[in-house]
Image (cartoon, rainbow, N blue to C red):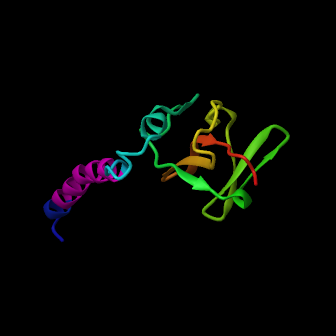
Amino acid sequence: MKPRLKILAFAILAISLPVISVTARDDGRYAASPLKAWFDSLRSNKGLCCSVADGFAVSDPDWESRNGHYRVRLDGKWLDVPDDAVITEPNRFGRTMVWPIRDSLGTSIRCFMPGAMT
């Protein structure tokens, strides 16, 4: 591939990636949920949760509390939840939720909301 063509291909890819990631976050499927506004307002001391990361429910075997701190298993690895990532308001959803950020440096946790272990 010619150098100019490589640069053009890279530029197109770089421009399109942010658009793809933004549209993937809120595709409208939860617009009618009575909890949508609540989820959109959730924040940890790291900032808003849903605005920068896709959250998902975590099964009980994949999280734990020990000595006042949390751990969660993501992608087969246990990660310590930073204290400033914990959401302290009551969990209206009921299930444990995590909002991971995956980038070139690995996986970090933006927000974590503990649920009731069953």
Q: Main secondary structure of the magenta part?
A: helix
In which quadrant is the N terminus drawn? bottom left
In which quadrant is the C terminus drawn? bottom right
Q: Give the residue furthest to the right.
A: 67
Asked if residue 61 lies in the magenta stretch, the reply is no
- Of 109 and 64, the residue lying toward us: 64
Name the residue rendered at 62%, 42% in the picture.
112
Image spot of residue 78 (x, y percent): 70, 56
- Of 14 and 50, the residue lying toward us: 50
- Of 8 and 95, the residue lying toward us: 95
Image spot of residue 63 (x, y percent): 71, 53
Name the residue rendered at 67%, 38% in the picture.
82
Image spot of residue 98 (x, y percent): 58, 48
Name the residue rendered at 44%, 41% in the picture.
34
Q: Quadrant of residue 66?
A: top right
Side of 44 relative to 117 (left or right): left
Asked if residue 16 lies in the magenta stretch, the reply is yes
- Of 110 and 14, the residue lying toward us: 110
Side of 83 relative to 33 (left or right): right
Name the residue rendered at 58%, 54% in the picture.
57
For residue 42, above or below residue 17 = above
Side of 65 relative to 43 (left or right): right
What is the count of numbered marks? 0
Image spot of residue 51 (x, y percent): 41, 38
User: Where does the magenta region start and end?
Assistant: 7-24
Q: Give the residue furthest to the bottom.
A: 1
